[in-house]
Image (spheres, coloured by chain):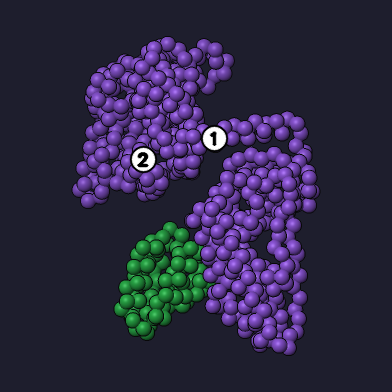
Chain colours: A green, B purple
Amino acid sequence: MKTFTYTIKDELGIHARPAGMLAKTAKALDSEIIIAKDDKSAAATKLMALMGMGVKCGDTITVTVNGGNEEASEKAMKEFLEANL
Amino acid sequence: MTTYKGKGVYGAVAVGKISVFKRQDVQVKREKVENTDNELKRLEDAKAAAITQLGEIYEKALKEVGEANAAIFDIHMMMVEDEDYNDAIVEMITSQNVNAEYAVAITGDNFAEMFAAMDDAYMQARSADVRDISNRIINCLMSSVTNEEKSNEPVIICADDLAPSETVSLDKDKVLAFVTAHGSSNSHTAILARNMNIPAIIGVGEEFLSAVKDGDIAVANGFTGEFILDPDAETIEAAEMKRAEEQEKKELLQKLKGKENITLDGRKINVYANIGSADNIGAVLLNDAGGIGLFRSEFLYLENSDYPTEDEQFKIYKRVLESMAGKKVIIRTLDIGADKQCDYFNMPKEENPALGIRAIRLCLNRPEIFRTQLRALFRASAFGNLGIMFPMIANVWELEEILAVCESVKAELKKDSIEYSEETELGIMIETPAAALISHKLAPMVDFFSVGTNDLTQYTLACDRQNPDIDRFCDTHHEAVIKLIEMAAESAHRYGKWIGICGELAADTTLTETFLRIGIDELSVSPSFVLKVRDTVRSIDLSKN
C-alpha cells in the first residue's frame, strides 16, 4: 500500500470535469485508488462519490494506492493530479 | 405589457413569438415486480439506450459549442454508469421487488438531494445533471420519445428550467432566446446558451410561466435580464434597433477577429479597452480588444467602506493581469475627488473640487494610500504585462515625487524578496493643458502618455462637464484641444515614447483619422466601441492627403 497527499490548486476544486477524468484515469489502473479528505473517502473510480466529497481549492487530499502495480499507479495518479487539479 | 425580471446570462436581444416548452410529464408509479431479473435486464437496456442518446448529444454539442462545453455530456455518460448510483438502483429493485422506473426515480432524487445539500453553489447546480440523466433513463425505460420542439419559425423558448441535454437538443436555428423560471448562472444551460450565442434569461420566477402562452409576442433582453410580455410598438422598435446594432457588431467581430489593426498604408495602431471594474474583463475579451488601455482603480475604493488593503488590491490586479494573459493592462492609480467622492477619505469640502485635491494631488498629500496601491500594483506586475498610469499631472516636480516613491517601493519589495516586473511601464495622463505644454519635459521621464480628453477639454475650454447648460460652449472637437494633443504627441515621439488617447474622444470615429495623422499610437475605448474603432482604423489611408 502506498499513500501520498496532494493539495488541490484548481480554482473550482474537484468539479465535474476533473472528477470524470480522475475516475477514468483510476479505472485504467490495476490498483485500487482511494481518495480521502477529513472523514470522507471515496474510490477514485466513483464519479458521483468524488464530486460528493466537495473537495475545494486548497484542500489537501490523501491518496491511497492498493494492490496491482502500486508504483506505476502512484506515479500515474501523481501525474494526473499535477496536470489537472 | 408586463415586464418580468430575471438574470441575463448572454447579452443579446430577441423579439418574437413564444413557445412554451412542454416536458413529457413522466409519471412514475411504484409497481411490484415478481421477476427482478427481467427488471434488471430492462434497466441495462435503458442505460445502453441512454448512453447512445448522450453520445449523439455529445457529438452535436461538440460541433455547436466546442469540446470544453460538450464535456458535460461525457460526464453524463459516466454518471449513468456510476457504480454507487447503479448499486443503489439494483439494490432497490432486488430487495424491494420494485419496477426499474421507480428505482431510478427514487435513486435519482436521493443523489440529486445529496448535491443540492452541498455548501457550494457549483455542486448544488449539479443536482440538475443527476435529475437529467435519471429522467433520460426513465424515458428510455418507458420507451417514450424525448422532447423535441417542432416549430417552423424561430421562437422564444419559455420553460420552468432546461436540462443541459434539452438545451443542446433544441434546433439552434429555431431558437431566438431561452427564458426560464428557475436556474442558476452556474448551470450548464446558462453556459451552453452563452456558447450558442443565444440570448438567455434565467430565474424569472414562477409567475411568468403561468402568464405566457404559445404564440404570444415577447421581448427577451439578455443584457438587462428583462422579459417583456406583450410589448408595445415602441418597446419592440427599441428592441429591434438594439438587435440590429448587436447583429452589426457580431458581423464586425466575425470580420475582424484575430486581424491586426493596421491602416491601409500599413501603420499599426493598438486599440484597447477602458474598464472600471474587474467584472468588465469578459466584455474586453468578447470585443477582441488588444489590451486594457485604462483600468480605473477607483472602484476598489468607491465600493469599500474602508481603505482597501494591499492584499485586497493585489488579488484583483493579479486576476486582471492573468485574465488578459500577457496583453497590456494599464492601471490608473486612484483618481478620486471632484465628482467621485468616498466618505471614509474625510475630504474637506471644497469650493471648486474639479480644481482641488483630486487624483495625484490626493496621493501625493497622503503617501500612505499611494504606497499601498503602488506596492499592490508592483507585486501584481509579476503576473502579466502591466503599465501604471498617473492622473492629473501638471508639474515636473509631481512626476519626480511619483517616480521617487515608485523607486522606493521597488527597493522595499526587492529587500523583502518579493517579485515584481522590471518591465512595468510607467506613464502619465495628459489631461491638464499644463501637461501638454510641458510635455517635452515630461516625456523623457516616462514610458508613455495617455490623453484624457474629457478633463483636457474641460480644463482647456473652462467648461464644467457636469453642467448641461454650457453644452454648446463645450466643443469637444475644439482646435485648441486637438493642438494640445498634437504637442504631446510630438514630445512623446521625440523621445521615442508612445502616446494613446483614453478619453471619450478616442471612440469618436469622425476623429480617428485626425488622431492617426497627429501620430497617436493607441486608442482606448469602452469595450462596446472597440470593434467599430478597429474597423475605422483599417479603412484609413494615411499616405493620401
Quadrant assignment for the C terminus of chain B: top left
Q: Residue at x 39, y 25 (%)?
A: B263
Q: Which of A19 and B165 is in front in this view?
A: B165
* Residue B338 sits above or below residue A25 on the image: above
Label annotation for residue B251? 1
Location of residue B480 by image quarter: top left
The secondary structure type at the circle numbered 2 is: loop
Q: Which chain carries label 2?
A: B
**Residue B373 x, y percent position in the rendering:** 35, 40
**Residue B140 x, y percent position in the rendering:** 68, 70
Question: Can residue B385 be seen by looking at this rendering?
Answer: yes
Q: Which residue is drawn at 41% across and 17% down?
A: B514
- Nearer to us: label 1 or label 2: 1
The residue that label 2 is drawn on is B327
Of the numbered discs 1 and 2, the one sitting upstream in the chain is 1
Q: Which residue is drawn at 38% across and 31% down?
A: B270
Label annotation for residue B134? none
Tag 2: amino acid: Lys
Q: Which of B74 and B526 is in front in this view?
A: B74
Q: Which of B189 and B184 is in front in this view?
A: B189
Discs 1 and 2 lie in a common subunit? yes
Mark 1 Cα within 10 Å, few/some/many (few <14, many 20+)? few
Q: Distance between the residues labelled 1 and 2?
A: 24 Å
Q: Is residue B530 left or right of residue B383?
A: right
Q: Is residue B470 left or right of residue B180?
A: left
**Residue B207 x, y percent position in the rendering:** 75, 51
CB-based contact (under 8 Å), mark 1 and mark 2: no
Location of residue B103 by image quarter: bottom right
Q: Residue at x 29, y 35 (%)?
A: B425
**Residue A36 x, y percent position in the rendering:** 43, 75
